[in-house]
Amino acid sequence: MTSDPVRLGVAGLGRAFMLMVPSFDADTRVKLTAAAAPREESRDAFEKEYGGTGYATVEELCADPDVEAIYIATPHQMHVDHVLAAARAGKHILVEKPLAVSMEDAEVMVSAAKEAGVHLIVGPSHSFDPPVELATQLISSGKFGQLRMIQAFNYTDFLYRPRRPEELRTEEGGGVLFSQAIHQIDVVRRLAGGMAEKIYAMTGAWDPKRPTEGAFTALMNFAGGCVANMTYSGYAHFDSDIWMNNVGELGQRKSEGAYGGARRALLDLNPDDEVRLKTTRTFGSGTTIEAEHNEHFGPVIALCDRADLRLTPDGIEVFGDTERGFIEAKFGPAPRRTVLDALVDAVRHNKAPDQTGEWGLASLEVCHAILQSAETGQAVDLQRQCKTNH
Ligand SMILES: NC(=O)c1ccc[n+]([C@@H]2O[C@H](COP(=O)([O-])OP(=O)(O)OC[C@H]3O[C@@H](n4cnc5c(N)ncnc54)[C@H](O)[C@@H]3O)[C@@H](O)[C@H]2O)c1
């Protein structure tokens, strides 16, 4: 055990927390000290597993003097109240993506953290994945010349995973923009240095039974000249993990028998059954995923003047002028080690990561710009972008 672990409180013991559990369990730099959850079953499961205190409300969690930082993993639309409560209590904050649903909320959250003098980190997102971190370093080193173009592509069954009703209503943050595009935007912005300028996009809402945007494609350019093409479908039958060496988003090996599983599980379910199915994936009910590789968010290729870089779950394939090579991105000991690196650096060493509140706000601006561009048919100028820290 590290002598002075960061004492972390968790707000929301749902799916997102479950995905962080293997990393918390493997990393002695962070100690789970308390949690807030409305369901008694989740609070009991937390206390049994971690021995901390389970509170019924986030406000009580924020008042716990033993908690130094709070990981907010509640639904998108609650992030604003929970971030404000944590900031008021002087706690450092790790908040799940997206930072918020509206830009107004995001602005208030960034200001509140600044005024309180606490770190606000937005994550995990796939911009924390070690191969993205490695590619960012390689690109910014200038070793391969100027970055010219990025292709980011992901075909998944996202829309057919079990959902709460509001996860299928765009105005409440539902659909693929706020939950999925945000990953791709974070990845692409990190590789290209953050300062996106303009975006032109089209979206698709193709299933009346799940009436929200389930797909989009967008072209975005950056200061310095790089252009990025981001394409996502959450309606996919083709699974682009095939092009990621059959490794799933969470670093797990994909089995052939899993094909069609999301749609199969939803057959004949009514919305109440679906919400119940979702809670079987949460803390106290669900099982954690065994990762063997780094996480990823679909195929990403970055074209530089002297090499093209393909991100894989294990590292970067470098296609140079006359030679090919591979640079490994270290996996583990915890799948989301880099998120905890950021948290520990912020709380213990006052060092902010790339993915600050301002960063999360800039990525959220891009989500809204995709919706706006799709609606108006016009390109949208981006006004709230920020640079990476390096
Ligand atoms: N980074 C990732 O890989 C990832 C994956 C999934 C979800 N997320 C994000 O995490 C957030 C939650 O999504 P989810 O899929 O885990 O949803 P979920 O419904 O599985 O979990 C949300 C949890 O918050 C709890 N909750 C609701 N109101 C609360 C309150 N007032 N106080 C404390 N807890 C409360 C619920 O009981 C539930 O357990 C979203 O913002 C989502 O974008 C991120």
Image (cartoon, helix red, strand yellow):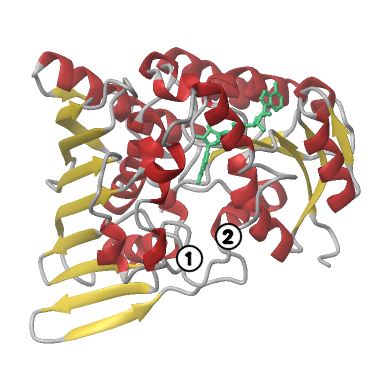
- Residue identified by numbered label 1: 252
Residue 186 visible to an observer of this rendering: yes
Q: Residues within 10 Å of mark 1 (few under 14, many from 20)?
A: some
Query: Considering the numbered disc 2 on the image, is that residue within a helix, a strand or a loop?
Result: loop
The picture places residue 48, in percent across and down from the top left corner, at 89, 49
Residue at position x 14%, y 86% from top? 323
Tell me how many marks there are.
Answer: 2
Using the image, determine if residue 235 lies above or below residue 293.
Answer: above
- Image height check: is 225 above or below 76? below
Q: Secondary structure at mark 1?
A: loop
Residue 86 pos. (x, y %): 71, 26
Are the two marked residues, 2 and 1, in contact with CB atoms closer than 8 angstroms? yes
Q: Quadrant of residue 303?
A: bottom left
The amino acid marked with disc number 2 is Ile
x 50%, y 23%: residue: 271
**Which of 63 and 236 lies nearest the eye of the viewer?**
236
Q: Amino acid at mark 1?
A: Gln
x then y, percent, for residue 26: 70, 65
In the image, taking residue 37 as reference, residue 310 lies left or right, namely left
The outermost residue toward the bottom is 323
